[in-house]
Image: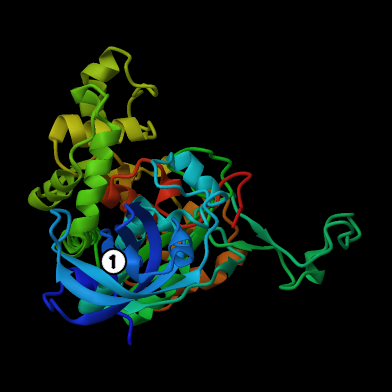
C-alpha cells in the first residue's frame, strides 16, 4: 500500500479506511494491553499517534520500537479519544525499517540545549525545533522565487569562484590547486599564480552583485539567490562564514523604486510564512516564550506572530542617515553613555544597537535609512550632489537591525572610476564592470538580503547557527 504522509493523515476525515505511514519514533508509552507510539516523518510539527494492541504483536518486535527507530505501519484510521489529535492509526501490521539502539541514540525524548544540538547537527532535523525551521526555510526559499517570478524577474546563477572582491573588504576564502607545501615561485620569490588552475588568484564569492549588474543592464530585472562566503573571524550569534544571499538588480530603478521593492518583498515573504507555516510558527513562538519566561518583561522579545504582523501592518519609516544621527545623538541611551559604541556625529558607522534603538524604541516601526557618508559605503554606490553622501539604503528590523542593504548604483563612468581610485580598487581588473558604464549605461539599483538574517527574524531564533542546516563558522566545518 502506498505511503501517506503524517501531515496529510492528521488532516484526513476518512475514518475507517486503511493507510500506511512511515516515519521515525519520537516516543513509545503504554501498558501491557496497549502501547501508544508517536510517529513523525518530517511532514509537519505534529506526530501521529499509533495505537498498538499488545496482544496482536510479538513482544520481540515491540521491544524494537524505540525512540529513533524507523517504522512502516499499516492500520485503520479512527477518531482519537484524546484531546491532542483528532485521529489516530490503529496498527494491524508493523515493520521495523531501521533499528535504533536506545543506549547510544543521543536524541532521547527530553529537552536538549541548542548548543548540544549543534554538536549533532546530522540528527537535529529530527527535533521539533529543527523540523519547524527546515519547513519554514523551504517555504521562504519557494516564496523568494515565486515573488520574483510573478514580477517578471529572471534568476541568474552568478559565479561562486571569482577573481573580484565585490565589497572591497579583502576578507575572502582563497581557491587554489597549487601545492601548499611547495608552491611555485617567480623570480621575485612570490607565489606564481600563473601556474594555478585559473592562472591568477581566485576566491569564493562574497556577493553576486557585480555579475548581477551585468545581466540587469540587458535583461532589465534579475535576481540571484546563492551561497556567499566571508572569511571574517567573527564568532558571534549573527555571523556565518557561508550563507545565502538574495540579490535583485534592476535597470531603470532609482533609490525610491529600490526601497519600494525591498518593502514589498519583505512583506510578501512574511505574509507567505503566516499563510503557509502557522503551525510551525506557533510551536516556535511557544518555545521562545518558554525560553524567556524567567526574563524581566522589558527584556523579553515581542511574541513571534505579533512581531511578524507588526512588520506587515506598518509602513516602513524612511529617513536619511543624517536625520538618524541627530536622533541618536540626542537619545537618552547616548546621553547617559548606555550605547556600547557612542554616537560621534556624522560619519559614525551605525551598529546593531543603534539600528534597533531607531526601530524598537524611537519609531516603533521598521525603518529604511538612506544617504550614508560615502566613506563608509562601497565604491559602486551613486554619489549624491553634496559629494559627501551616497544613495544607499538599509532596511532595519526589530531584534535584527539591518536585514537588507542596497543602493542606487553609480552609472556615470567618470564618477565610478574616481571612486575606485579613491578606494584603491584596480581598474584593470574591473574592466568588464566598467564596460557596462561605457556601452549604454542607465540608472540602476539593487539590494542584498541575507537569507539567514531573514530566517532569524521569521523563526524568532536568536543564533544564526540554528537557521542553516550545517553552519560554517571559525574552526567549525563539521558535517
- The image shows residue 188, relative to residue 195, as above or below, that is above
What's the residue at 88%, 60% (across, down)?
185
What's the residue at 16%, 48% (across, down)?
305
Q: Quadrant of residue 364?
A: top left
Could you classify mark 1 by the number of other residues whose Cα lies within 10 Å: few (under 14), some (14-19), or many (20 or more)? Answer: some
Which percent across, then down, holds residue 430?
A: 56, 66
Name the secondary structure under disc 1: helix
- The image shows residue 314, relative to residue 345, as above or below, that is below
Q: Is residue 459 visible?
A: yes
Q: Name the residue tied to disc 1.
A: 139
User: How many marks can you see?
Assistant: 1
Which percent across, then down, holds residue 39?
A: 33, 63
Residue closer to the observer: 99 or 54: 54
Q: Is residue 394 visible?
A: no
Q: Quadrant of residue 301?
A: top left
Relative placement, left or right, of 349 versus 79 is right
What's the residue at 35%, 58% (across, down)?
131
- The image shows residue 91, relative to residue 353, as above or below, that is below
Which percent across, then down, holds residue 375?
A: 43, 41
Give the quadrant of the C terminus.
bottom right
What's the residue at 32%, 86% (across, down)?
2
Residue closer to the observer: 371 or 279: 279
Residue closer to the observer: 76 or 214: 76
Residue at the top extreme of this rendering:
336
Relative placement, left or right, of 375 versus 86 is right
Which percent across, then down, holds residue 328?
A: 25, 26
Residue at the bottom extreme of this rendering:
1
Give the quadrant of the N terminus.
bottom left
Q: Quadrant of residue 153?
A: bottom left
Residue closer to the observer: 469 or 18: 18
Amino acid at each position: 500500500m502506498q505511503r501517506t504522509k503524517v501531515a496529510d493523515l492528521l488532516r484526513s476525515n476518512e475514518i475507517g479506511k486503511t493507510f500506511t505511514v512511515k516515519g521515525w519514533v519520537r516516543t513509545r508509552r503504554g501498558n501491557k494491553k496497549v502501547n501508544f507510539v508517536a510517529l513523525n516523518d518530517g511532514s509537519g510539527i505534529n506526530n501521529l499517534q499509533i495505537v498498538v494492541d499488545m496482544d496482536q504483536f510479538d513482544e520481540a518486535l515491540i521491544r524494537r520500537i524505540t525512540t529513533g527507530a524507523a517504522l512502516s505501519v499499516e492500520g485503520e484510521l479512527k477518531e482519537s479519544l484524546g484531546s491532542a489529535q483528532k485521529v489516530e492509526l490503529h496498527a494491524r501490521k508493523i515493520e521495523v525499517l531501521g533499528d535504533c539502539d536506545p543506549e547510544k541514540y543521543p536524541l532521547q525524548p527530553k529537552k536538549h540545549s541548542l548548543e548540544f544540538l549543534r554538536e549533532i547537527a546530522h540528527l537535529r532535523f529530527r527535533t521539533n525545533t529543527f523540523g519547524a525551521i527546515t519547513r519554514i526555510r523551504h517555504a521562504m526559499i519557494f516564496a523568494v522565487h515565486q515573488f520574483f517570478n510573478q514580477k517578471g524577474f529572471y534568476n541568474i546563477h552568478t559565479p561562486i569562484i571569482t577573481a573580484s572582491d565585490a565589497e572591497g573588504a579583502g576578507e575572502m576564502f582563497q581557491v587554489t590547486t597549487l601545492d601548499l607545501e611547495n608552491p611555485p615561485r617567480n623570480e621575485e620569490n612570490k607565489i606564481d599564480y600563473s601556474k594555478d588552475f585559473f592562472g591568477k588568484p581566485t576566491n569564493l564569492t562574497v556577493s553576486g552583485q557585480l555579475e548581477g549588474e551585468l545581466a540587469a543592464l540587458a535583461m532589465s530585472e534579475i535576481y540571484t539567490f546563492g551561497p556567499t562566503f566571508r572569511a571574517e573571524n567573527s564568532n558571534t550569534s549573527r555571523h556565518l562564514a557561508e550563507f545565502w544571499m538574495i540579490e535583485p538588480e534592476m535597470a531603470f530603478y532609482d533609490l525610491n523604486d529600490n526601497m519600494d521593492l525591498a518593502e514589498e518583498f519583505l512583506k510578501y515573504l512574511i505574509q507567505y510564512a503566516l499563510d503557509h507555516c502557522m503551525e510551525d510558527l506557533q510551536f516556535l513562538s511557544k518555545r521562545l516564550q518558554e525560553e524567556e519566561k524567567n526574563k524581566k518583561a522589558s527584556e523579553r522579545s515581542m511574541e513571534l506572530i505579533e512581531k511578524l504582523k507588526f512588520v506587515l501592518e506598518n509602513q516602513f519609516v524612511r529617513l536619511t542617515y543624517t536625520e538618524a544621527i541627530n536622533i541618536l545623538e540626542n537619545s537618552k541611551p547616548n546621553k547617559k553613555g548606555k550605547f556600547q559604541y557612542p554616537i560621534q556625529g556624522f560619519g559614525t558607522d551605525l551598529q546593531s544597537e543603534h539600528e534597533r534603538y531607531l526601530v524598537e524604541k524611537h519609531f516603533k516601526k521598521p525603518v529604511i535609512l538612506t544617504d550614508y557618508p560615502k566613506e563608509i559605503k562601497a565604491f559602486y554606490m551613486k554619489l549624491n550632489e553634496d559629494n559627501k553622501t551616497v544613495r544607499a539604503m538599509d532596511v532595519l528590523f526589530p531584534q535584527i537591525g539591518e536585514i537588507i542593504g542596497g543602493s542606487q548604483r553609480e552609472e556615470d563612468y567618470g564618477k565610478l572610476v574616481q571612486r575606485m581610485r579613491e578606494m584603491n580598487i584596480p581598474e584593470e581588473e574591473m574592466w568588464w564592470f566598467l564596460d557596462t558604464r561605457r556601452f549604454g549605461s542607465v540608472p540602476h539599483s539593487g539590494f542584498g538580503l541575507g537569507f539567514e538574517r531573514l530566517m532569524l527574524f521569521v523563526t524568532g531564533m536568536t543564533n544564526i547557527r540554528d537557521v542553516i542546516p550545517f553552519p560554517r563558522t571559525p574552526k567549525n566545518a563539521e558535517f
